[in-house]
Image: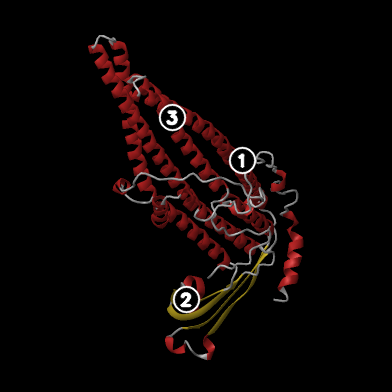
């Protein structure tokens, strides 16, 4: 071994024909401190405890929703696929680690050989000979330039990224279920509003018919109200269709058949408050699955560059075979049967037709792409947080205005109803006063659904409280198992 190192160094000096000069990566990771968001989030409630918990959906206060998500996390085929991808990436890292280590194998073989007399003469040729062999084969590639280590670290980084992607799939599944559940609640509210409007229109139709019989009215108002009643029933039917479709969607999300959706009762959802953490955007680096995975892939790509650079240097392979060989089994274990073969072998890249340079160029491009994806993930994360907070803030203002309008309409309706009971207003006045109240109820239901969706968006934008393996700026010291 002492003779190998000088030989390798001398060979490296001769490798100038295969040069990596001038090939460098150009990408650089964005500093999150440069992505200011203080003014955009200035009016939002700030709290150190505002990061979502691992079961962030519990804030909606619906036990049925909690059960659906638990069921999905235990049985969804989408998660099975993500877990399988993670296991495959870990296995690939294990293969890269195994390539760095010595190997030892044993073999047994029976050889038959006959050399023609025309080639070896009558002394050696013409006879068929049989030899028995027992061998031990040893192979080891000293990683002088760190190429194998870099390949293993790159594979390990990709495995960690796949692990994070699997966690992100869980967050996405939970978010999809909550969104479908919120839409289901809105569909029930829309059905209620449509049924109420149909009942109001039917009452108007009945009054119109009475007034026509009494000679007090014509058929214009009757036809209008009959049309409104039919339209309201169509809206109620459309809402029922949406309810059925959303129940089917939820059943599929939890990994069950459509009959599971029939068991889902009407949602009973609260509307959580929103707040942003005090450490934005820097803490997103450790909490957002896409950012953490992107950082792992940047590190993996950097190790890929290291491996490509190491390929410009010579490689030394050590191999040895020790065994026993004899013409018959009785002589196999004799002292004269020892067979030894082996030694170092050196491979020196001189002229590669541009293969090594193009390989390094590709590794540099992979790194630049990984950095660009990381920067894009960081920008997207900040934007999603800002969109969710600003959306929730705007919806809170709309909800407040709509509630004031609804309270005013309710007072007007109550006043007309009281006048009707006192004989100072007729039933037409009451039904006319009811219309804006029903319309505002429908608007409130839609705004509440949007406001709950904004909460989902914010919880997801803040990472969903999932535990993520963190990346390092240095090589991980975790070793893969054999």
Q: Which residue is mark 1?
A: 386
Which circle marks residue 247 in the picture?
A: none
The quarter of the rendered structure image containing the N terminus is bottom right
Q: Residue furthest front?
A: 422
Residue in the picture at 43% in, 79% down: 130
Residue drawn at 52 percent across, 79 percent down: 136
Whether residues under marks 2 and 3 lie with C-beta atoms below 8 angstroms apart, the answer is no
Q: Answer above or below: position of 58 versus 224.
A: below
The residue tagged with tag 3: helix, strand or loop?
helix
Could you say whether the residue bearing mark 1 is in a helix, strand or loop? helix
Q: Is residue 353 visible?
A: no
From the viewer's side, name the closer residue of 393 and 349: 393
Q: Measure the alpha-carbon separation of dots 2 and 1.
A: 87 Å
**Is label 2 in a helix, a strand or a loop?**
loop
Disc 2 or disc 3, which is closer to the eye?
3
Residue 100 in percent (x, y) is at 60, 68
Q: Identify which residue, 406 or 20, lies in the foreground.
A: 406
Q: Residue at x 46, y 45 (%)?
A: 270
Considering only vertical position in the picture, is 326 above or below 273? below
Can residue 104 be seen here?
Answer: yes
Q: Give residue 364's position: percent from left, percent from top.
A: 67, 49
Q: Which residue is mark 3?
A: 410
Q: Quick one: label 1 or label 3, which is nearer the N terminus?
A: 1
> Residue under circle 2?
125
Q: Earlier in the sequence, mark 2 or mark 1?
A: 2
């Amino acid at each position: 071994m002492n003779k190998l190192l000088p030989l390798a160094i001398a060979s490296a000096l001769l490798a100038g024909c295969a040069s990596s000069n001038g090939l460098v990566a150009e990408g650089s990771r964005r500093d999150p401190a440069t992505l200011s968001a203080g003014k955009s989030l200035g009016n939002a409630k700030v709290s150190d405890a505002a990061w979502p918990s691992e079961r962030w959906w519990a804030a909606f206060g619906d036990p049925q929703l909690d059960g659906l998500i638990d069921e999905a996390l235990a049985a969804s085929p989408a998660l099975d696929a993500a877990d399988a991808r993670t296991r495959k990436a870990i296995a690939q890292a294990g293969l890269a680690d195994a390539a760095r280590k010595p190997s030892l194998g044993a073999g047994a073989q029976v050889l038959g050989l006959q050399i023609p007399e025309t080639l070896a003469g009558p002394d050696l040729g013409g006879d068929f000979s049989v030899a028995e062999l027992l061998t031990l084969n040893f192979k080891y590639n000293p990683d002088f330039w760190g190429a194998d280590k870099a390949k293993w670290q790159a594979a390990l980084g990709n495995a960690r990224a796949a692990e994070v992607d699997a966690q992100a799939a869980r967050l996405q599944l939970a978010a999809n279920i909550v969104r479908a559940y919120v839409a289901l609640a809105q569909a029930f509210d829309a059905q209620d509003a449509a049924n109420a409007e149909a009942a109001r229109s039917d009452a108007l139709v009945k009054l119109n018919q009475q007034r026509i019989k009494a000679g007090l009215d014509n058929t214009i108002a009757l036809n209008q109200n009959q049309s409104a009643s039919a339209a309201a029933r169509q809206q109620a039917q459309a809402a029922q269709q949406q309810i059925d479709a959303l129940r089917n969607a939820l059943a599929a999300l939890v990994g069950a058949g459509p009959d599971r959706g029939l068991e889902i009762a009407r949602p009973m959802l609260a509307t959580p408050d929103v707040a942003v953490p005090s450490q934005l955007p820097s803490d997103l680096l450790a909490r957002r699955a896409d950012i953490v995975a992107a950082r792992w892939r940047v590190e993996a790509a950097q190790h890929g560059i290291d491996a490509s650079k190491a390929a410009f240097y010579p490689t030394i392979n050590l191999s040895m075979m020790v065994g026993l060989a004899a013409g018959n089994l009785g002589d196999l274990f004799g002292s004269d049967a020892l067979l030894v073969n082996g030694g170092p072998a050196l491979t020196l890249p001189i002229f590669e037709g541009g293969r090594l340079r193009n390989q390094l160029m590709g590794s540099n491009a992979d790194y630049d792409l990984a950095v660009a994806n990381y920067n894009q993930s960081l920008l997207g994360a900040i934007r999603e947080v800002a969109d969710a907070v600003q959306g929730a803030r705007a919806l809170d203002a709309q909800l407040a205005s709509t509630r004031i309008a609804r309270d005013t309409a309710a007072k007007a309706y109550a006043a007309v109803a009281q006048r009707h009971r006192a004989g100072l207003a007729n039933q037409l006045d009451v039904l006319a006063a009811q219309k804006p109240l029903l319309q505002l109820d429908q608007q409130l239901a839609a705004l509440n659904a949007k406001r709950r969706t904004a909460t989902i968006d914010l919880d997801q934008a803040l990472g969903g409280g999932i535990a993520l393996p963190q990346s390092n700026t240095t090589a991980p010291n975790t070793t893969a198992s054999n």
